[in-house]
Amino acid sequence: VREQLPDPDQVEEALSEDWFSMNKKRVLDALVEDPEEQGRIKEVLKQHYVQLDELFKTFAASGSSIADAQDLELSEFEDFCHQASLVATGPHSTSVMVSCFQECNGDFSHSHRQPDKRSRRGGSTIQTAHVARPEFFNSLIWFSISAEIISVLSFPNFSIKFFVYSFPF
């Protein structure tokens, strides 16, 4: 059984790589400006990294073969959002999910957020085709901030309580 448990050093290394990638396009800085708050978020991700990685892989594989389970297409992301109850069913749910999908991949072209306040250029205007695991983690932060609630992801085998935010937009 011990061999099946995740190696803490490998988890730490994978999280470090993902954390770096989460801010490649300054997405993390646009979502959470305060470095101390970013540190608290990183600790929450560290505590639940293995479960979140498995959750990501499950949804990434849902629309494709297991071999292609490296990213989420929009339809897989929408399925995740609905199953996790991150969006209400209604006419605006798709636009909310698309906004999150684009921003978490660095496309701020239709957003009030800017990845770098010193620059008004914003992000890419290219339509986002998929999100990888770091962008998926950004989406969890995005929903936590946007909803200004305690996010709880509930699935048959586990639930994860996320962050409490109350940021003025």
Image (tube, rainbow, N blue to C red):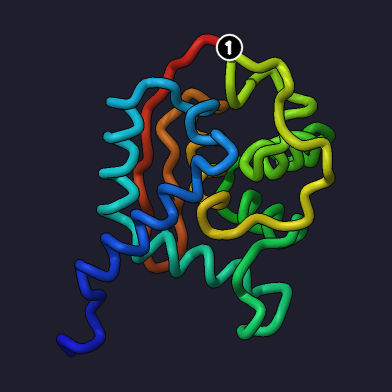
Residue at 50%, 45% in the rendered image: 22
> Vertical placement of 125 versus 85: above or below?
above
Residue at 34%, 38% in the rendered image: 41
Give the image location of residue 149, x and y in percent: 45, 27
- Quadrant of residue 65 within the rendered picture: bottom right
Give the image location of residue 38, x and y in percent: 35, 32
- Quadrant of residue 72 within the rendered picture: bottom right
Q: In this rendering, would 162 be left or right of 111?
A: left
Q: In this rendering, would 87 be left or right of 54?
A: right
- In the rendered image, the residue lying farthest to the left is 2
> Vertical placement of 106 versus 108: above or below?
below
Secondary structure at badge 1 equals loop
Quadrant where the N terminus is found in the figure: bottom left
Q: In this rendering, would 56 be left or right of 101?
A: left
Quadrant where the C terminus is found in the figure: top right
The one nearer the camera, 80 or 70, is: 70
Residue at 44%, 69% in the rendered image: 54
Give the image location of residue 82, x and y in percent: 65, 51
The amino acid type found where label 1 is placed reads Phe
Find disc 1 in the rendering and name its residue: 169
- Quadrant of residue 39 within the rendered picture: top left
Give the image location of residue 28, x and y in percent: 49, 35
